[in-house]
Image (cartoon, helix red, strand yellow):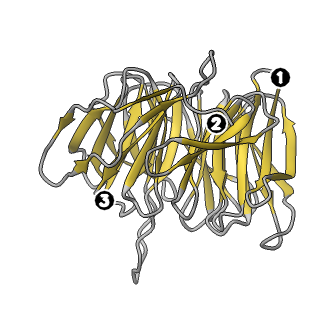
Amino acid sequence: MSGPSRFFPAVLSIRWSSGACLFLLGCRVWAAAEAATVPITALAFTPDGQELVSNGARRVDVRSAKDCSLQRTVPCALSKITALAFDPGGSVLAAAGGEPGVSGAVLLLDWRTKTVRQHFTNATDLVNSVAFSHDGSVLAAASGDHRARLWRRPGTNGPFAEAFTLTGHAGPVLAVAFSPGDGTVVTASADRSIKVWSTEDGRLLRTFGHHLEAVNALAFRPAAMASDKTPPAFCASASDDRTVRIWQPEIGRMVRILRGHRAAVLTVVYAQDGRSLFSAGKEGIIRRFSADSDERLSEWRAGEDWIYALALSPDGRQLAYGNWAGEVGAFGVR
């Protein structure tokens, strides 16, 4: 196992306002040892919160959740890994990627044995995003061939079978996310649009065309813990147009626009309690916004390079990021 070649504390520039709190929690930045560093485009915490996984050169890097240090590696046959996602039970890791302009694939890794359970290779361009439904029964993948694909499995441990292909985008599909109730799946594209589809039969329900540039990332606000009447789900989208926009995709409503980024926004994630959301991109600055207004609560610099990935720990207390320089770091949040 090869170890990291650099270790240094991150430099923070934090702007505070009422209602927000961020603190340094074992924050470290680690860069891969390869001469040609692999940009970090995929991050995911294990469901138990003990480890953090990131993409490497034909491998998945397994890191300590405490300080992001590289602990071990898992071989992966993809020439480029763009997205990682655990199923809700934490027994399967989906790794997505492929070769740009040639082929795309999703590998399902048994996380206990680190062996491949299934291998989907029907995309004709790079797979850019992958997601499991909240009940784990559906797998979705978005690819550069202008399509998203869904697979369904009948039981908890059974194999996935192809359900349907979502067609209609005029450009590469860059992101995919399931609504909290799993009744719809949302896709975002370089064609500037966001589309909402039924997970039951793959029907296109509606399209949003408000963004002015490519839409790079999607994140749903966590569902309410308990409510007599659950409101329509909120979804955040991050775009090259320097905005994050908030939607209620199931009823066809754009709620608000979050401004403040001065360059493309590449990634977005909601806090575990749903009260705020984090976004980052080309500036190397992470910003925290209120989930119920357009108020910017705080911001801090996480490095000098583009931030492509954010991941929140299952307990909501740690935010990890990965950037183009191949660095992975984490902050404590509350």
Residue type at the position of mark 2: Asn
- In the picture, measured across the screen, residue 200 lies left or right of residue 226, that is right
Mark 2 secondary-structure assignment: strand
Q: How far apart are marks 1 and 2 (CA)?
A: 20 Å
- Whether 97 is drawn above or below 235: the answer is above
Q: Do the residues labelled 1 and 3 touch (CB within 8 Å)?
A: no
Asked whether residue 147 appears in the rendered view, the answer is: no
Dot 2 crowding, Cα within 10 Å, few <14, some 14–19, many 20+: many
Q: Disc 1 marks which residue?
A: 102
> What's the residue at 57%, 28% (across, down)?
32
Rendered-image quadrant of the N terminus: top right
Q: Disc 2 marks which residue?
A: 55
Mark positioned earlier in the residue sequence (1 or 2): 2
Asked whether residue 138 appears in the rendered view, the answer is: yes
Q: Position of residue 63 (x, y in %)?
A: 56, 45
Q: Disc 3 marks which residue?
A: 275
Residue toward you, 151 or 158? 158
Dot 3 crowding, Cα within 10 Å, few <14, some 14–19, many 20+: some
> What's the residue at 25%, 37% (across, down)?
299
Residue toward you, 243 or 320? 320
Residue type at the position of mark 3: Arg
- Whether 272 is drawn above or below 227: the answer is above
